[in-house]
Image (spheres, rainbow, N blue to C red):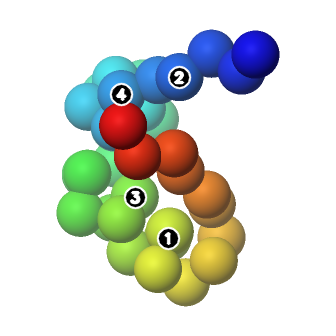
Amino acid sequence: MKELIKIRDVSVKYDVSARTLRYYEDMGLITSTRS
């Protein structure tokens, strides 16, 4: 089972906004699992 990381934790760790991460997801650059 993969470890799930909250978008907030990723945004802090990589110094990008949650909005940017969602944009990357929309562009197909990253994938997410919704709970």
Query: Disc 4 and disc 3: Cα gap in Å?
Result: 11 Å
Q: Which mark is residue 6?
A: 4
The reply to whether the C-beta atoms of the residues labelled 1 and 2 are less than 8 Å apart is: no
Q: Nearer the viewer, residue 18 or 13?
A: 18
The reply to whether the C-beta atoms of the residues labelled 4 and 2 are less than 8 Å apart is: yes
Q: Amino acid at mark 1?
A: Tyr
Q: Nearer the viewer, mark 4 or mark 3?
A: 4
Q: Amino acid at mark 3?
A: Leu
The reply to whether the C-beta atoms of the residues labelled 3 and 1 are less than 8 Å apart is: yes
Give the labeled residue for mark 3.
21
Label 1 Cα neighbours within 10 Å, binned few <14 / some 14-19 / many ≥20: few
Quadrant assignment for the N terminus = top right
Callout 4: SS: loop
Q: Is residue 26 left or right of residue 22?
A: right
Residue 29 pos. (x, y %): 65, 70
Residue at position x 42%, y 32% from top? 10
Number of marks in the rendered image:
4
Q: Is residue 11 left or right of residue 27?
A: left
Residue 9 pos. (x, y %): 34, 23
Query: Disc 3 and disc 1: Cα gap in Å?
Result: 5 Å
Residue 13 in view (yes/no): yes
Callout 1: SS: helix
Residue 35 pos. (x, y %): 36, 37
Query: Disc 2 and disc 3: Cα gap in Å?
Result: 15 Å
Q: Is residue 34 above or below residue 5?
A: below
